[in-house]
Amino acid sequence: MSILKPGVNCMGIYEVRESGLLIDACDYYRAFYHAARHARYNILMAGWQFDSEVRLIRGKEAQLADGDVRFLAFLESLCEKNPELEIYILAWDFSVFFSLEREWFQDLIFNWSTNERIHFTFDGKHAVNATHHQKFVIIDGQLAFVGGIDICSDRWDDRRHLRHNPERKNVDGISYGAYHDIQSYHTGSVVRELLGLFQDRWAEAGGETIVFPTVNGHLPKVDGAALPLPAESVAISRTQARDLLALREQIQEIRRLFIDGIMAADRLVYMENQYFSSQAIFQALVSRMKERQRPKLEIVLILPDRLPFTEELFLGLPQMKMLNG
């Protein structure tokens, strides 16, 4: 029996033709790079953070590339080669607490020093203390990447997660520690639903109303070490905080889905995340473990051994200590 309930823990369930996973930013950046090269009309990008100088491919592959592989320069080259291509980038209008981790003056960098068909907007239209944390890319309304990876500095790594990797350097050329995350990819009707979400977010953030042409018979390929999934449908779950004027409804589909999944688990819950700070998820794990009439539950929880300073500052680790203790 499926735990997915449209209107409760997901927005809806939608058909997919292809679906799969890209493990870590090395594979995701490569897949995005090759898919974007085949874009005909539009590339839509929403994220928590973008950096203009991040390298999409590295090592020998970058040396053999036929142009600049840095994010913004690469997008500019696509527009120069294709006069019909429009690119839209929606980024969180970040808090001052993250200013040392961010590239400054991005509205100038992306809008005033680049091709006129690259459109960049900061999203600051959300509830107090909330962030725009949806990370997805849509190419020609046919292919979507969705997951946890931003195209920005300090995110690139490959699956080896070596202690020392000469390619794992930020935009300033400084080495940083191993980083793990996952991005999914999808084709099929679900992509149109994600396109609608992007249009809504773009308009709410103050961007112009945009209508995209329907592209038929054109499908960018997903290159890289992708892991195909034999799925026929996928669900979209969202989080949205109610603002002070109550103009936006509160949506907690992701929270509800996590809790429903934990409570439905028979023997194993596997969780990996960048941090663990949700009391609701912690209480769900405890409640499920206390159900004596059901099989004993094994919980595998993988977290970074060290969080960024800003996450430690805001979140702390009391729940993780309780769970591991």
Image (tube, rainbow, N blue to C red):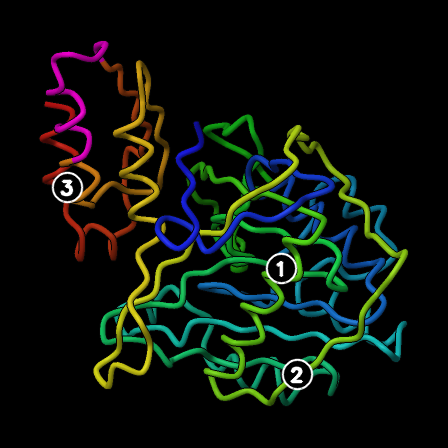
Give residue 53's position: percent from left, percent from top: 61, 64
Q: Which amino acid does label 2 sit on?
A: Ile
The answer to which of marks 2 and 3 sits earlier in the sequence is: 2
Say whether marks 2 and 3 touch (CB < 8 Å).
Answer: no
Looking at the image, which is closer to me, 235 or 127? 235
Looking at the image, residue 257 sits to the left or right of residue 281; the answer is right
Give residue 193's position: percent from left, percent from top: 60, 61
The answer to which of marks 1 and 3 sits earlier in the sequence is: 1
Q: Which amino acid does label 3 sit on?
A: Leu
Where is 58 relative to 111, above or below? above
Residue depicted at x 39% and y 55%: 7
**Residue 313 occupies quadrant:** bottom left
Give residue 66's position: percent from left, percent from top: 88, 56
The secondary element bearing badge 3 is classed as loop
Where is 297 relative to 270, above or below? above
Mark 2 — residue? 210
Q: Which of the labelled discs sits on residue 114, or is there none?
A: none
Q: Which of the labelled discs sits on residue 137, or is there none?
A: 1
Q: In which quarter of the image is the N terminus?
A: top left
Where is 87 relative to 150, above or below? below
Mark 3 — residue? 317
Marks 1, 3: nearer the viewer? 1
Looking at the image, which is closer to me, 22 or 305? 22
Residue depicted at x 41% and y 45%: 5
- Alpha-carbon span between mark 1 and mark 2: 16 Å
Residues in magenta, as a range: 284-296
Crowd class of label 2 (few under 14; some 14 to 19; many from 20; radius 10 Å): few
